Amino acid sequence: MGRAGGLVMGAIVLGLALTLALVAALDPPAPRASAPAISGADAPPDYGDTLRRCRTATEADPECEAAWEAKRRHFFRTEKSKP
């Protein structure tokens, strides 16, 4: 295959690439599934102020431990009976 054959092969590859790009650009995107709604039961507990305060706590605080445990239960989706 000489210079002419290389040019023909290059033109074919370039034509295929342009065709694929055109098809991809004109093809409408597939519809995406909407995010599931979060019910009130699945909403995370609101311990924002408590957890912010507990981040810097140096001593054991029962309120902090309860807030962290509730946050862990919500994050890992485990149902643990309260003592």
Image (spheres, grey):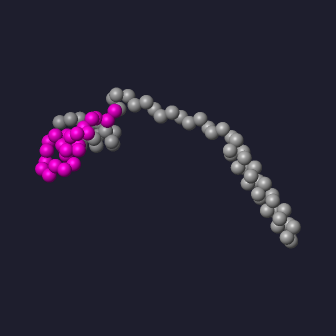
- The answer to whether residue 61 is seen in the rendering is yes
Viewer-proximal residue among 69 and 15: 15
Q: Is residue 18 magenta?
A: no
Q: Quadrant of the N terminus?
A: bottom right
Above or below, comparing residue 23 to residue 41 in the picture: below
Q: Where does residue 41 sit, x and y in percent of width and height?
A: 33, 29
Residue 79, compared with residue 60, is above or below; it is: above
Q: Is residue 67 visible?
A: no
Residue that extends furthest to the top in the rendered view of this protein: 40
| View extreme (bottom): residue | 2
Identify the magenta region.
Answer: 43-66
| Residue shown at the point (40%, 31%) measured from the top left | 38
Residue at 68%, 45% in the rendered image: 24
Viewer-nearest residue: 39 or 3: 3
Instruction: State left or right for residue 73 relative to residue 21.
Output: left
Residue 21: x, y in percent? 70, 49
Q: Give the x, y percent position of residue 10.
A: 79, 62
> Can you tell which quarter of the image residue 26 is in?
top right
Quarter of the image with the C terminus is top left
Seen from the viewer's position, the closer of residues 18 and 32 is 18
Residue at horizontal 45 percent and vertical 32 percent from the top = 36
- Between 18 and 68, the one lying in front of the other is 18
- How many labels, in total? 0
Splitting the image into 4 quarters, where does residue 27 fall? Answer: top right
The picture quadrant where one finds residue 66 is: top left
Please tell me which residue is depicted at 19% across the width and 46% down the height of the picture.
54
Q: Tell me: 40 left or right of 1.
A: left
Is residue 53 left or right of 27 when viewed as pictured? Answer: left
> x, y (%) of residue 14?
76, 57
